[in-house]
């Protein structure tokens, strides 16, 4: 189960960094000037990602204590990966914004479920080490995302 969580959290966090190296290319595609690029792509999308993802974290965290965690985790990962996949097909800024918000929902929702399950599976004296292994996936994913994003930029 640790491998599954490490893999999925890496994938979710890889998506997080895919836009950053490509903001100018995306801005050109949408016909944005430099100010619009900075505000809409550099600011508002991140704002939506986190302002939606953070409250979702509280809701999903509460649900993780109330319902079966497997379908809850699957649903949160699915929402984020659908958002990531759909990003490739967007033609408008609002569609891009919506896709990025979906990925925020996924990251916000997946993390409390993972740590809740880890708390159930491991005794207190092992949790920090196991949590560190899973958390390594966030940095690994961000690094992989940067590499992928850099290779996609023309």
Image (cartoon, helix red, strand yellow):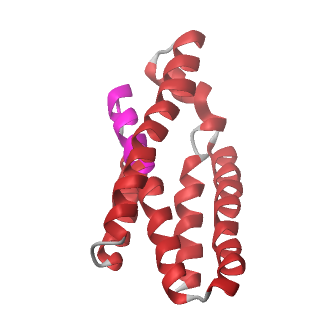
x, y (%) of residue 50? 48, 40
Residue 88 in view of the camera: no
Front-most of residues 118 and 1: 118
In the image, taking residue 149 as reference, residue 114 lies left or right, namely left
Res. 123 image quadrant: bottom right
Q: Residue furthest front?
A: 124
Say if the magenta span includes residue 99.
yes
In the image, taking residue 77 as reference, residue 145 lies left or right, namely right
Residue 39 in the image: above or below residue 23: above
Front-most of residues 19 and 57: 57
Magenta region: which residues?
Answer: 91-104
Q: How many marks?
A: 0
Res. 24 image quadrant: top right
Residue 119 in view of the camera: yes
x, y (%) of residue 6? 59, 74
Residue 142 in the image: above or below residue 4: above
x, y (%) of residue 65? 35, 72
Residue 59 in the image: above or below residue 50: below
* Identity of the residue drawn at 49% across and 31% down: 47
* Identity of the residue drawn at 39% across and 35% down: 96
In the image, taking residue 115 as reference, residue 126 lies left or right, namely right
Say if the magenta span includes residue 45.
no
Res. 19 image quadrant: top right
* Identity of the residue drawn at 61% across and 34% down: 22
* Identity of the residue drawn at 57% across and 26% down: 42
Please tell me whether the stretch drawn in magenta is mainly helix, strand or loop.
helix
x, y (%) of residue 134? 63, 73
Image quadrant holding the C terminus, namely top right
């Amino acid at each position: 189960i640790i491998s599954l969580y490490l893999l999925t959290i890496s994938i979710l966090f890889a998506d997080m960094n895919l836009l950053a190296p490509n903001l100018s290319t995306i801005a050109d595609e949408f016909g944005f000037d430099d100010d619009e690029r900075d505000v809409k792509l550099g600011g508002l999308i991140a704002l939506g990602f986190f302002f939606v993802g953070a409250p979702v974290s509280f809701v999903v965290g509460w649900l993780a204590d109330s319902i079966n965690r497997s379908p809850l985790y699957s649903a949160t990962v699915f929402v984020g990966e659908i958002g990531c996949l759909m990003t490739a097909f967007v033609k408008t800024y609002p569609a891009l914004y919506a896709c990025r918000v979906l990925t925020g929902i996924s990251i916000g929702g997946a993390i409390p479920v993972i740590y809740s399950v880890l708390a159930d599976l491991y005794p207190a004296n092992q949790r920090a080490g196991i949590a560190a292994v899973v958390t390594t996936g966030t940095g690994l994913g961000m690094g992989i995302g940067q590499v992928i994003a850099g290779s996609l930029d023309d």
